[in-house]
Amino acid sequence: MTDRYAVFGNPISHSKSPLIHGIFANETQQVLEYEAILAPKDDFESCLKLFWFENGKGANVTVPFKEQAFNLCDELSEEAKLAGSVNTLTLLTNGKVRGDNTDGLGLVADLIRNISSLEGKRVLLLGAGGAARGSVLPLLKAGLKVCIHNRTQEKAEKLVEIFTPFGDVKALSIAELIGPFDIIINSTSSSLSGDIPAIPSCVIGADTLCYDMMYSKELTSFNSWALDLGAIKAIDGLGMLVGQAAKSFELWRGVTPEVDTTIKLLREKIESE
């Protein structure tokens, strides 16, 4: 029986995960099935149990189920524990379920693709929600100095409390945003509505790389704003999406897929839609 994998979410029809993992499987000559599953918002657990029963081996989890998935795990990676959420589930040979959070690992992998060396660089992380929380530990492990700015200062300070044991991390108020920063990462959903974060232009210098976790056919509003202010480069989150999927695939299959071709194919598909 063919090993089954899936992404669970609600909504889920927009997901690029089946396409991405299909490319990975072809590239690495792995025989598997990968599908998108629309789980009921009030019954994710039963839906997941049925999937395991029907030869499911691993699953990705997206909104709104990442916290529920976290609570259903028998063991958790360090990234997942500190993120408080899970995007990758693996059914172990002993029947237990392991939870990982590969989002931040995908982000760091994409930053390295674009910059090569991250060690010692100063990063401004905008937002303190789930996407930000899942990214702080991998950013610190990569040797970055992380400054978090959020509209609600207390949320940023809460993240600093959690992650201070792991590296150089601080919360900055709007008055403390004195740049330029080496890297600015937008983890907020502002680009979905065409908005830009309310931060001063001095955070961007001629050598600042800006990264929006959102991706789209056109430049995101954040990246457009960044380039207008003279940022050296602006990247959207497509590489992060592929990168986190590659980490999941590696956890499940023990092989590491090459991401450049997948990113290129995905970009072409998005631009043709």
Image: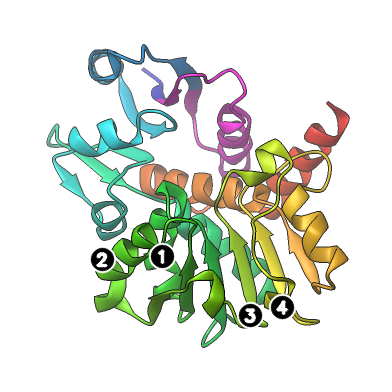
* Residue 202 tag number: 4
Question: Which element is circle 3 on?
Answer: loop
CB-based contact (under 8 Å), mark 1 and mark 3: no
Looking at the picture, which amino acid does disc 1 mark? Answer: Val
Q: Between residues 209 and 270, which one lies in front from this camera angle?
A: 209
Q: Is residue 101 above or below residue 118?
A: above
Indicate which label's residue lies in the foreground, 2 or 1. Answer: 2
Q: Residues within 10 Å of mark 2 (few under 14, many from 20)?
A: some
Asked if the stretch drawn in magenta spans residue 21, the answer is yes
Indicate which label's residue lies in the foreground, 4 or 1. Answer: 4
Task: Specify which label sits upstream in the sequence, 4 or 1.
Answer: 1
Name the residue beneath numbered marker 1.
136
* Residue 162 tag number: 2
Mark 4 → mark 2, Cα distance in angstroms: 28 Å
Looking at the picture, which amino acid does disc 2 mark? Answer: Ile
Q: Residues within 10 Å of mark 3 (few under 14, many from 20)?
A: many
